[in-house]
Amino acid sequence: MIGFLKYIKGYLRIRVWGFSPERFMNLCSNKGILLWDIVKTGEMYEMCIHVSGFRSLRPIVKKTGTRVAILRRYGLPFFVPEIWKRKVFVAGLFLAAAFWILSSRYVWRIELNGNYQITEDVFNGFLEEQNVKIGMERDDLNIAELEKEIRRRFPQIIWASAKLTGTRLSIDIKENDTPLIAEEKEDGAGMDLVSEYGGRIVSMIVRSGTPVVSIGDTVETGAVLVEGKIPIYNDDQTVREYRYVEADADIVLEYGVSFQATLPFDYIKNVYTGREKQSRYLRIGENRLRLPQEEPFLTYDCLIRERMPVIFRNLSIPVSFGTCQYREYLKVEFRYTKEEAEAALKEKLISFLSGLKEKGVQMIENNVKIETSGETWILKGEFLVQGPVGKSAVTARTESGETQENEQ
Amino acid sequence: MRKKKEPGRQKEQIVESLKLPRDILTGAMKITLTGSREAWIENYRGLLEYTQEQILLQGKTCQVCFEGSQLTIDYYTNEDMKISGCICCVRYL
């Protein structure tokens, strides 16, 4: 800080020699002139002095019989006149400052966080419809309205927050984890629960609807488990009408699942040769500028690293620079050993089983075997599992008159 | 006959009893050394001699000589000064 203040005020490095330099220093200190970095070089003394102090040196110099020479000038009072001579540089400086001030009035980056179901393309399309795009003026952006519009347009978004920090607009959204009802229910229509698999019912808790099957029953795929209509009886035990509801029940079914995975004996793997080439590019908006170059290798992949210069913390501009690292590889054919094949097939099996586990399925019995057929490894698995079933389907409507006739 | 006290002794007794800073009232030079590389000096009258090997300062009551090598004065004001370098000896003359 002191150094900065000295720089602002401006100071000189001087050389003092003559009859009595020590007396010169004493008189300077008595007059309140600060001297620093005093070094004796040979018969002379070198020291730093403020510009204001230097201007009042004349009587001291006369009195002490010393001589003073300026070695170097430091600080803003000397820098400014010097810089004014370089007109183009000064103009560039002002233009750069003007550019930064001007560019800070626009939105240069839009970030979307928290999207899983909604793709960025879809969201960007929506933003374009709302006239929210890169390069728009910050003042034109109505954040509260944008947040409302996001929730209105995407019903699966349960929370949306937009934040403008500097020139960056970050939109954070939270999507509803529970899936939306795929099949739209007609007004007054009931919904049945049907079985997706064929098997034996192990447990059943019905909350709404009429159960059609009971524990221990064997059902086929597509069989109705719980009907979405509740009969209302007359006094003579005939059905007067049906009240249609959305069937809701926890039903556990024991059923068989089979799994099969195949793996060819041979596989092709990309083996990197170690030869690499690099090229740099500059991206301005959507345009990528790079030096023209030939195909680096016959077969290669490219690793792109891109960085965006962030000048000040919140001022980001749509300019980025990056490097493309081309890595040559050869396609080499390999043959699985028995252990490798088993490991690869088991990995597939584990991924299948973990998928089942996520659905809440419990394993009762399993029978897995790996065999070869022609030029292929085959994993076959038969599993007996217990898991929740029940898929919604629209209840077949029964006319009350027709029913009454049937009942009669 | 009552014995008259020395004026220096009397002053010291007052400073002692009132717990006043000794360096201000007695005009003693105050030297603060940090290892053998730096020294801060206050309460001096002036600089008598300055070479790279020796810095001689005039105090109110005595002279103090700093000896060493590559001695430089980091700053020099009416109030205090700082000496840097390799100080090997501080002598009171």
Image (tube, coloured by chain):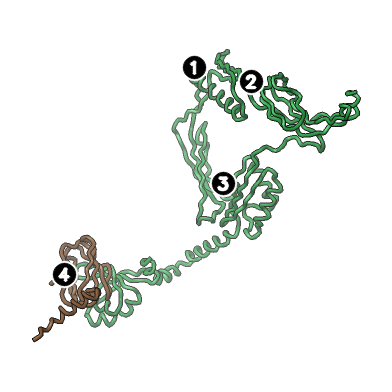
Chain colours: A green, B brown
Q: Amino acid at mark 2?
A: Val
Residue that mark 4 sits on = B65
Local SS, label 3: strand
Residue in the foreground of this view, choosing between A247 and B49: A247
Q: Position of residue A161 (x, y in %)?
A: 62, 51
Q: Amino acid at mark 3?
A: Arg
Residue that mark 2 sits on = A257
Residue that mark 1 sits on = A338
Mark 2, other Cα within 10 Å: few <14 / some 14–19 / many ≥20: few
Chain containing the residue with disc 3: A
Q: Position of residue A26 (x, y in %)?
A: 24, 77
Chain containing the residue with disc 2: A
How much space separates mark 3 and mark 1, taking CA atoms? 48 Å
Locate residue A121: give its quadrant: top right
Q: Which quadrant of the rendered structure holds the N terminus of chain A? A: bottom left
Q: Position of residue B56 (x, y in %)?
A: 17, 71
Residue that mark 3 sits on = A288
Q: Which circle, 3 or 2, is nearer the viewer?
A: 2
Chain containing the residue with disc 4: B
Q: Amino acid at mark 4?
A: Cys
Q: Which circle, 3 or 1, is nearer the viewer?
A: 1
**Which residue appears farthest toward the bottom when viewing the image?**
B1
Residue in the foreground of this view, choosing between A12 and A259: A259
Residue in the foreground of this view, choosing between A236 and B16: A236
> Is residue A241 shown to the viewer in this render?
yes
Q: Position of residue A292 (x, y in %)?
A: 53, 43
Residue at screen point 64% across, 47% down? A159
How much space separates mark 4 and mark 2, taking CA atoms? 99 Å
- Please report contact status of discs 4 and 1: CB closer than 8 Å, yes or no: no
| Dot placed on the residue nearer the N-terminal end, 3 or 1 | 3
